[in-house]
Image (tube, rainbow, N blue to C red):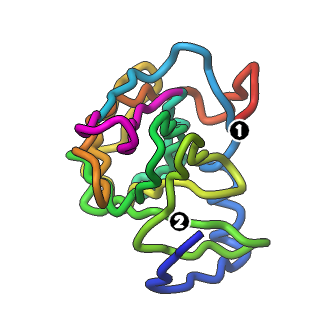
Amino acid sequence: MRRRLVGRVLAGPGLVAAAALVLTGCGSSGSSGSSGSADSSGSSAAKLSVKDAYMPQPVTDSMAAGFLVIENDGGTADELTSVTSDIAQDVTVHETTGQSMQKVTALKVPADGELVLKSGGNHLMFENLKRKPKEGETVSLRLNFTKSKAITVEMPVKSATYQPTSGH
């Protein structure tokens, strides 16, 4: 898997506590989170779709986390290169190793596989929130890829302590 590191953020005790609350829970919520798909021409091209998207209600006014699964039913790998949303000034893709988060410029979506963004692992960080989303609302985001067309996802906001019934 090819990853390009942009920076490394070491979590201090306060950030660890806040991140632990923000990153509470992960998994699939069955049908929650509308899925988008992007089809490319050709039978071996990446065929991407999104499922199980959700955002725990943020515990701070400045940042939130997002989780989802990107499935690739095609024979070609792709990469998630960036994410945008009107709810935040910046949306970054993070990889978590131990107690540190690393912002990365891309994460691989394997051919005939999936990229799982979950609590304690790879995830999205919505930074510099323009407003604090509330439980029951939906946040719109756009996932951008190296090869495939962008996918727009409607991500439901769940309670801050949401625990999905089945994990991902």
Q: Residue 80 in the image: state x and y as whole percent.
A: 40, 57
Question: Label 2: which residue?
Answer: 94
In the image, is residue 48 part of the stretch drawn in magenta? Answer: yes
**Nearer the observer, 2 or 122:** 2
SS class of the residue under badge 2? strand
Kindly identify the residue that appears in the image at 60 percent across and 57 percent down: 122
The image quadrant where one finds the N terminus is: bottom right
Q: Is residue 2 above or below residue 8?
A: above
Q: Is residue 85 above or below residue 31?
A: below
Quote the CA–CA distance across marks 1 and 2. 16 Å
Q: Earlier in the sequence, mark 1 or mark 2?
A: 1
Q: Residue 107 in the image: state x and y as whole percent.
A: 49, 63
Question: Label 1: which residue?
Answer: 25
The magenta span reads 39-51
Q: Residue 35 in the image: state x and y as whole percent.
A: 39, 24
**Nearer the observer, 6 or 20:** 6
Q: In the rendered image, which quarter is residue 83 located in?
A: bottom left
Q: Is residue 161 left or right of residue 117?
A: right
Kindly identify the residue that appears in the image at 28 percent across and 34 percent down: 39
In the image, is residue 130 part of the stretch drawn in magenta? Answer: no
Of the residues tagged 1 and 2, which is closer to the observer?
Answer: 2
Q: Is residue 166 left or right of residue 11?
A: right
Q: Which mark is residue 157?
A: none
Amino acid type shown at disc 2: His
Q: Residue 17 in the image: state x and y as whole percent.
A: 71, 62
The image quadrant where one finds the C terminus is: top right
Amino acid type shown at disc 1: Gly
Kindly identify the residue that appears in the image at 50 percent across and 52 percent down: 109
Label 1 packing within 10 angstroms: few (<14), some (14-19), many (20+): many
SS class of the residue under badge 1? loop
